[in-house]
């Protein structure tokens, strides 16, 4: 059997199992990676290099800081403050989702989920409501605005580097509104969707501020995480693991402070044990499998299909790029996909005699939003579900798609339309 076909079939089988076996996803991903290695689809020499260690380090470091943040009771205080300004549960969820979206425009989506999810959990606990749709909404919203700025997502950095775009170019470029406006239009259109999904959550909210914060250092460390990640993004030639180093270093400072504060090594070990190793292993397995299908030529073959299917119509090609990018990003990592497709869509634009930014923006919008269709389509989704599973909640694929699919379709349609009207 052709290696590319075999790799694609194995990939499809893995994703079906990921959607079915929700409580053992990390085992499925690692087993699939092992099969890729045994069959020679992924060379052993490329396995470790395929893993995005920067993402895993960011995730592990932020998990530790967030656990200290939770123990400080700051999320509980923030939840009580939020509940004082919203009329009901429905608007509490919408406000948390908007908050996550704003942060994710400037900070990695995974870090955003880990920062905002504790507040969402505290709100759900305070209101005695199911936290699963709350955390899913936060994860989905964190993915919506990743392409809004140069620093919001790795795919944005890829576009900025490829097209020589600065931070300000995302807002205003070549005398026209930049991609930020299209992304924000899509994000705003998801508000009515969330209001409809949570339309029955109209119970009045009554809350008094009773929580006492016992340690302000973890909150300061989380703010420093946001600031330093934004600052680091301004340096294009920084070491590859810079963001991971930042998150791990701040986590170590937090652990050291906890040791000095409590004078008990057991309290520090208890925090370290909360690190969600299942999520880290799931991501490691997915990174290796995706590298395998990339090396097998699956992604290249997909790129070539665009050229054949689009014909000579600018509108048809734009819709094709947007729709296919949404669909594929629900199943594959959008980073290698965007890196592969940027030169392809630029070449297509040159053939058709249109601005390459129209197709580049369509590619970025589709690839960024598509991860919201499935629970394993984006690292932020995996992180959010990992938090819920660690607390004993079982999240089904249906639970996620009930929120993720309508938000994705509405945001992609609105953002894509605005982008086409400005740049066609």
Image (spheres, grey):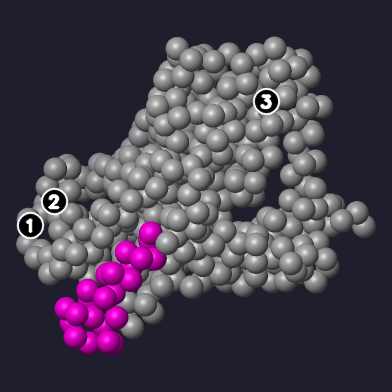
What secondary structure characterizes most of the magenta part?
helix
In front here: 298 or 370? 298
Q: Are marks 2 and 3 in contact (CB under 8 Å)?
A: no
Which residues are the magenta region?
Answer: 246-268
Give the answer, above or below, for where 51 lies relative to 334.
below
Of mark 2 and mark 1, the one earlier in the sequence is 2
Looking at the rendered structure, the secondary structure element under dot 3 is: helix
Of mark 2 and mark 3, the one earlier in the sequence is 2
User: Within 10 Å of the Cα at label 1, are there few (<14), some (14-19), or many (20+) other Cα atoms?
Assistant: few
In front here: 407 or 369? 369
Image quadrant where residue 1 sits: bottom right
Looking at the rendered structure, the secondary structure element under dot 2 is: helix
Q: Position of residue 200 (x, y in %)?
A: 31, 44
Q: Position of residue 231 (x, y in %)?
A: 35, 45
Q: Residue furthest right?
A: 1
Disc on res. 346? 3
Pointer 2: what residue?
81
User: Split into 4 quadrants, where in the image is the C terminus?
Assistant: top right
Q: Is residue 258 magenta?
A: yes
């Amino acid at each position: 059997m052709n290696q590319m076909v075999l790799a694609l079939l194995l990939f499809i089988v893995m994703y079906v199992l990921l959607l079915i076996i929700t409580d053992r996803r990390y085992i499925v991903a690692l087993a699939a990676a092992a099969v890729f290695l045994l069959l020679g689809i992924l060379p052993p020499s490329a396995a470790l290099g395929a893993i995005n260690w920067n993402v895993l380090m960011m995730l592990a470091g932020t998990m530790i800081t967030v656990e200290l943040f939770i123990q400080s009771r700051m999320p509980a205080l923030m939840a009580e403050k939020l509940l004082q300004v919203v009329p009901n549960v429905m608007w509490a969820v919408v406000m948390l989702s908007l908050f996550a979206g704003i942060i994710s425009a400037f900070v990695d989506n995974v870090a955003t989920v880990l920062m905002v999810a504790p507040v969402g959990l505290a709100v759900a606990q305070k209101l005695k409501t199911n936290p699963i749709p709350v955390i899913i909404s936060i994860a989905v919203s964190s993915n919506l605005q990743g392409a809004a700025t140069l620093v919001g997502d790795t795919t944005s950095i890829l576009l900025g580097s490829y097209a020589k775009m600065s931070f300000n170019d995302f807002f205003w470029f070549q005398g026209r509104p930049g991609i930020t406006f299209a992304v924000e239009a899509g994000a705003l259109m998801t508000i009515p969707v969330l209001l409809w999904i949570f339309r029955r959550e109209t119970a009045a909210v009554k809350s008094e501020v009773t929580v006492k914060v016992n340690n302000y250092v973890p909150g300061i460390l989380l703010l420093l995480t946001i600031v330093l990640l934004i600052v680091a993004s301004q340096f294009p030639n920084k070491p590859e693991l810079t963001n991971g180093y930042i998150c791990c270093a701040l986590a170590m400072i937090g652990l050291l402070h906890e040791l000095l504060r409590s004078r008990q090594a057991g309290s520090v070990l208890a925090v370290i044990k909360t690190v969600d190793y299942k999520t880290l292993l799931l991501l490691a397995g997915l990174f290796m499998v995706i590298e395998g299908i990339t090396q097998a030529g699956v992604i290249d073959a997909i790129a070539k299909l665009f050229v054949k299917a689009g014909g000579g119509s600018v509108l048809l090609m734009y819709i094709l790029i947007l729709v296919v990018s949404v669909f594929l990003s629900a199943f594959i990592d959008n980073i290698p996909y965007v890196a592969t497709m940027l030169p392809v869509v630029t070449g297509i634009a040159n053939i058709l005699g249109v601005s390459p930014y129209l197709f580049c923006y369509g590619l970025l919008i589709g690839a960024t939003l598509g991860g919201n269709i499935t629970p394993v389509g984006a690292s932020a989704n995996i992180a959010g579900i990992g938090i819920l599973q660690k607390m004993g909640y079982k999240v089904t694929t249906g639970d996620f798609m009930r929120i993720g699919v309508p938000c994705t379709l509405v945001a992609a349609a609105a953002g894509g339309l605005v982008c086409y009207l400005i740049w066609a």
